[in-house]
Amino acid sequence: MIHLLKGNIGTGILAMPDAFKNAGLYVGLFGTLMMGVICTHCMHMLVKCCHELCRRLQVPSLNFSGVCFASFETGPIGLRRYSHMAKNLINTFLIITQIGFCCVYFVFVAVNLQEVVAHYWMMLDTRV
């Protein structure tokens, strides 16, 4: 649930008014709903695949890269040789995603702090 909140909501929810301003009311509304349905459907498919692979391999749980690895290992024979590469690729994408989240949070906090400091600095500056 935390991954769902951080990955799909995060600081992006605070940018929604600006996104709706740029997209328009109808495109913003229906686009947001459509993207929500697509993201939820993809996460549901991932969870279903994880449950099926856990049942087949008789393991209690799998992580993201474990699901990819097991999918390739138990899939078509031609794809089995790419299982380690797929696992490494998923781990690389997860690292890039986490770094991206951190960068977004740093920028968000810095911009808001800059606005607060600028507001109060102007109030304290008597030369203006």
Image (cartoon, grey):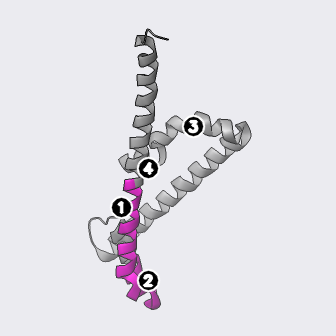
Q: In this view, does 25 lie above or below 7?
A: above
Q: Give the range drawn in magenta.
A: 71-99
Q: In this view, does 44 lie above or below 114?
A: below
- Tell me the kind of residue under disc 3: Met
In the shown orientation, is residue 56 left or right of residue 28? left
Between discs 3 and 1, the one toward the N terminus: 3
Between discs 2 and 1, the one toward the N terminus: 2
Q: Nearer the viewer's eye, disc 4 or disc 2?
A: 4
Q: Alpha carbon of mark 2 to alpha carbon of mark 3: how far?
A: 40 Å
**9 or 59: nearer the viewer:** 9
Q: Alpha carbon of mark 4 to alpha carbon of mark 2: how far?
A: 28 Å
Question: Percent position (x, y) of residue 115?
Answer: 46, 27
Magenta run includes residue 87 = yes
Q: Nearer the viewer's eye, disc 2 or disc 1?
A: 1
Magenta run includes residue 46 = no
Label placed on residue 95? 1
Mark 3 closeness class: few <14, some 14–19, many ≥20 residues within 10 Å: some
Callout 1: helix, strand or loop?
Answer: helix
- Tell me the kind of residue under disc 1: Ile
Residue matched to label 2 = 75
Q: Alpha carbon of mark 3 to alpha carbon of mark 1: how far?
A: 25 Å
- Tell me the kind of residue under disc 4: Gly
Callout 4: helix, strand or loop?
Answer: helix
Instruction: Tell me which residue sits at (40%, 60%) in the image.
Output: 96
Callout 3: helix, strand or loop?
Answer: helix
- Tell me the kind of residue under disc 2: Gly
Between discs 1 and 4, the one toward the N terminus: 4
Give the residue furthest to the bottom: 78
Residue matched to label 3 = 16
Residue matched to label 4 = 7
Instruction: Tell me which residue sits at (31%, 66%) in the image.
Output: 62
